[in-house]
Image (spheres, rainbow, N blue to C red):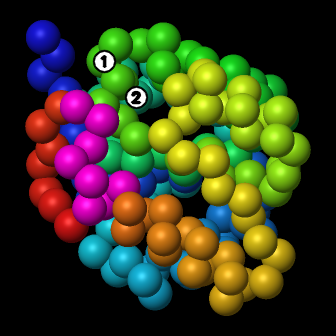
Amino acid sequence: MSSQVIDRRRVLVVEDSQEDAEAIERALNRTHPHLVLEFTHRADGLVERLTSASLLPGMILLDLNMPGVSGHSALASIRACPALSAVTVVVFTSSTAPAEEDACYAAGADSYVYKPVNFELFRTVLKGAVDFWQESPGRGGSAAGGA
């Protein structure tokens, strides 16, 4: 059994666009000031980084189109790792392709959320996704902290 603990107050944002990362930070700081946000602009080494940490994020906001390891590959790697099975993965992307959404759900995404261009709508959509997963009992392990 792993000694890792999931902290549902922590959100790891995997986003290569600095502009989108800043928008996510502004939006979540307004709607969920209690969250601890961590940012990385690449998915390379993501599973290794997570599995070597003693404290896991309760949620990963994952962009799909990134240089290096794609969001699709990162999602597959996360879901292939039993130690990360209780971490919620929300794909937060600009892609509206139904086939891409279907592929993400088939690979184990918990949610697929489209990034609107309008900031107010962006904030509303992001708030809804975070609220839903913060209020849910999680994917399966025990959680530290709470909503």
Region of the chain picked out in magenta, as a range: 133-140
Quadrant housing the N terminus = top left
Which residue does the numbered mark 2 point to in the structure image?
Answer: 50
Q: Would you say residue 135 sits in the magenta stretch?
A: yes
Q: Image height check: is 5 above or below 68? A: below
Q: Image height check: is 79 above or below 142? A: above
Q: Identify the amino acid type marked 1.
A: Ala
Decide if residue 14 is in sight here: no
Q: Would you say residue 57 sits in the magenta stretch?
A: no
Which residue does the numbered mark 1 point to in the structure image?
Answer: 83
What residue lies at 12% left-to-right and 37% top-to-bottom? 142
**What label does residue 144 carry, if any?**
none
Q: Do the residues bearing badges 2 and 1 touch, measured as CB atoms within 8 Å?
A: yes
Quadrant housing the C terminus = bottom left
**Quarter-wise, where is residue 105 in the image?**
top right
Q: Main secondary structure of the magenta part?
A: loop
Instruction: List x then y, in percent, for residue 55.
Output: 24, 38
Instruction: List x then y, in percent, for residue 90.
Output: 54, 47
User: Is label 1 in a helix, a strand or a loop?
Assistant: helix
Query: How far apart are the alpha carbons under marks 2 and 1?
Result: 9 Å
What residue lies at 36% left-to-right and 24% top-to-bottom? 84
Q: Identify the amino acid type marked 2.
A: Leu
Asked whether, in this view, residue 137 is left or right of residue 24, the answer is left
Instruction: List x then y, in percent, for residue 87.
Output: 36, 36
Instruction: List x then y, in percent, for residue 86.
Output: 30, 31
Q: Image height check: is 68 above or below 92? A: above
Label 1: how many Cα within 10 Å (few below 14, some 14–19, many 20+): some
Asked whether, in this view, residue 62 is left or right of residue 3, the answer is right
What residue lies at 82% left-to-right and 41% top-to-bottom? 98
Mark found first going from the N terminus, 2 or 1: 2
Front-most of residues 53 and 119: 119
